[in-house]
Amino acid sequence: MAKIYHKQLVSSKAMVDAAHKNKYAVGHFNINNLEWTKAILEAAQASNTPVILGTSEGAIKYMGGVKVVVGMVNGLLDELKITVPVALHLDHGQSLEMAKKCIEAGYSSVMFDGSHLPYEENIAKTKEIVAFAKKYEVSVEAEIGSIGGEEDGVVGQGELGDPKQASEMAGLGITMLAAGIGNIHGKYPEWWKTLSFETLESLQDAAKLPMVLHGGSGIPTEQVQKAISLGISKINVNTELQLSFRDATRTYIEARKDLDDEAKGFDPRKLLNPGFKAIQNTFNELTAIFGCKGKA
Ligand code: 13P
């Protein structure tokens, strides 16, 4: 069977393989709406940077469903004349049904996150999605261990990945592997000190595949760059763009520009513009740190 996805999308495979070989990381940026998507695509094109657009199940639901996301992204690729490599990726797919649904709707990359399942089930389901995705030339990300994050107000550290599992996962034919290496989704709490580089090294030795760093917001630059030198080839960022958008929007509102009716400061095209530009600035800063800027 042939690819389902739009001719301008690519799978993540060539992007992350090149990054792995040349020791940089491709940015995976989560999109939340039209402004996010357009801001990222324009900035990627302007800087000649490959990019992975990530959508969590929650964001897909928020935007109206997979068809809305696929239609919006493909429409922007055409209308903005985007020529840099762009993958549309399901982030933390929780079920095989959802991963298959995304592929059939036109995604070019999926993550099946079976990290909360018993390990044998994670393996079996990952194997199934690899076989399914292969028919459509769609890349697959799997996860072992777990990423820390907030649950009921408590921020957990997550569970470190196990090298034996990393090697078994790699053997299934996945494109890239996410693993718990002390990383956390959302803002890093005060007590957090460092990624576990020993864990990353042993997982990389075992898997020999591009590795994915989730929770890419707010990790000190030296740690990000060390992680890249040890095999991280894709870095997922959501919170950092949200904070940039929030700060710029807050400045606009605190300057009471939204209340300037004469200048139509209430028009969403004006109200959302500072946040839009802030997303682009943060994209440019992060892609420079990740080393993927200009690598299209
Ligand atoms: P942050 O929100 O911490 O950047 O994490 C994003 C992420 O890992 C999405 O998969």
Image (spheres, rainbow, N blue to C red):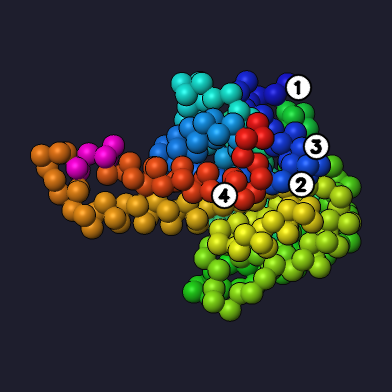
Is 92 part of what is drawn in magenta?
no
User: Of label 4 and label 1, which has the lower sequence position?
Assistant: 1
Q: Label 3, label 2: how many angstroms apart (C-alpha)?
A: 28 Å
**Is the CB atom of the residue marked by disc 1 within 8 angstroms of ligand 1's nearest atom?**
no
User: Of label 3 and label 4, which has the lower sequence position?
Assistant: 3
* Pointer 1 local density, CA inside 10 Å: few below 14, some 14–19, many at least 20: few
Give the magenta range. 265-270
Regarding mark 2 in the picture, which secondary structure is present there?
loop
Q: In this view, does 274 lie to the left or right of 139?
A: left
Query: The residue under label 2 is which amino acid type?
Result: Lys
Tell me which image quadrant ligand 1 sits in.
Answer: bottom right
Q: Is residue 198 left or right of residue 193?
A: right
Q: Residue at x 15, y 39 (%)?
A: 263
Query: The residue under label 4 is which amino acid type?
Result: Leu
User: Of label 2 and label 1, which has the lower sequence position?
Assistant: 1
The image quadrant that residue 1 belongs to is top right
Q: Label 3, label 1: how many angstroms apart (C-alpha)?
A: 12 Å
Query: The residue under label 1 is which amino acid type?
Result: Met
**Is the CB atom of the residue marked by disc 3 within 8 angstroms of ligand 1's nearest atom?**
no
**Is the CB atom of the residue marked by disc 2 within 8 angstroms of ligand 1's nearest atom?**
no
Query: The residue under label 3 is which amino acid type?
Result: Ala
Q: Label 2, label 1: how many angstroms apart (C-alpha)?
A: 33 Å
Q: Label 4, label 2: how many angstroms apart (C-alpha)?
A: 15 Å
Q: Is residue 99 left or right of residue 211?
A: left
Q: Residue at x 62, y 20 (%)?
A: 7
Q: What label does residue 131 carry, if any? A: 3
* Pointer 4 local density, CA inside 10 Å: few below 14, some 14–19, many at least 20: many
> Please, which residue is most extreme toward the bottom here?
191
Q: What label does residue 23 carry, if any? A: 2
